[in-house]
Image (spheres, coloured by chain):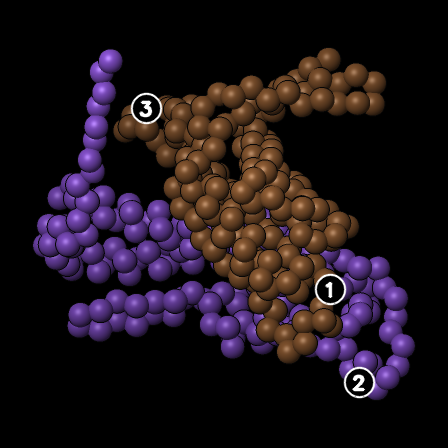
Amino acid sequence: MISVSITPKFDSKIIYDEFIEKNWFEFQSELFDAGSTMLSYMQQYITSKVKGESTGNLIRSIKLYSETGTASVSWGIGLISEMNVLAPYWHIIDVGGSGFKGDYHFVPGFFNGNKFVYNPMIAEGKSLPSGVKGIIKPMHYVDATRLQLDREIQRIITSLKGK
Amino acid sequence: MAHKYRVSRNLEASFIEFLNITLKETPYSWENLNVIKGFANAYELPTPTIAVRAENTVYDKVEVGSNSFMRTVQIFIDIFASDDGMRLDLKDCIIEILKDGLIYNEYTITKSGRTATATPTPNGRIRIQKINDTPIDFNVDDKSKLDIHDRYRNLLTLSVSIGRVE
């Protein structure tokens, strides 16, 4: 019987010291570029999932917000407060769920961004229209982009290792 | 007449079969649990329900200049629980049993009249590269106003590979 034992040597400090710190400016630049790459990825991901006609509001509402300092890079994709205005249903499209159909919001309300809004008719004690329940299939575009970002960071570190 | 599933459907079916069997067995022993493919069908079933889907696939070249690729598939597992405790328990159970990977089955579908039978043949292992665990929160003050399926939801996003050069 032949047995082989492999012990991986992994130390995040080594990765930082050997690859990232030595190529700090390049690392910063690559990470900064990753922001626009991820923005494109998310927009393309949504486009690929859209069935039928689309207003394009969701894609237009997703923007890149970046900040650069002398020793830091930070960016974010999508500002919730802005998306709530430009594409109020961004959250329900992302995570899916019971939605609405036709002219009526079915019982008991509807989603506005990530906030559920109760149908005002409930408060007024009126009977609600019995619309057909519509199920919105989730796109999960946020999680898909998050996984892609992991791959991108891995790619950047790997490319720096080769320097 | 028989036909075979391709990789994406084999992955989905392998996950569904594995979760369905393992979660109902000791020590987990979940009762009345539905494990299904897709998403919308979950709203037709009582909770707890787990909906599995294979979505985007990324193909990385194995080496420069080669026409061979290795695929990484995103698997979405939507959990529809009956209460918040169940949501937490169920997603922890799923992570616990999936983190070590699972058997990759290739399915042959045999149709006889209106009946179709799926026969799995083990052919490798599915490796889990990454798991994202996200609770789905609709930011509602009173959850009872939501559809029962939307009250206690959780999403697990997996990045998986069968480690096969194609």
User: Which chain wears brown?
Assistant: B
Which amino acid is tagged 2?
Ala
Residue linked to disc 2: A123
Which amino acid is tagged 1?
Asp
Which amino acid is tagged 3?
Ser
Asked if labels 2 and 1 touch by Cβ distance under 8 angstroms, the answer is no
Residue B66: mark: 3
Looking at the picture, does residue A68 appear above or below residue B10?
below
- Protein chain holding label 3: B
Q: Real-space Cα distance between discs 3 and 1?
A: 50 Å
Q: Position of residue A124 (x, y in %)?
A: 84, 86
- Viewer-proximal residue among A63 and A19: A19
- Element type where label 1 sits in the image: loop
Badge 1, how many Cα within 10 Å: few under 14, some, many 20+? some
Residue drawn at point x = 72 percent, y = 62 percent: B148
- Protein chain holding label 1: B
Residue drawn at point x = 30 percent, y = 57 percent: A33
Badge 3, how many Cα within 10 Å: few under 14, some, many 20+? few
Quadrant where the N terminus of chain B lies? top right
Task: Tell me what hue chain A is rendered in.
Answer: purple
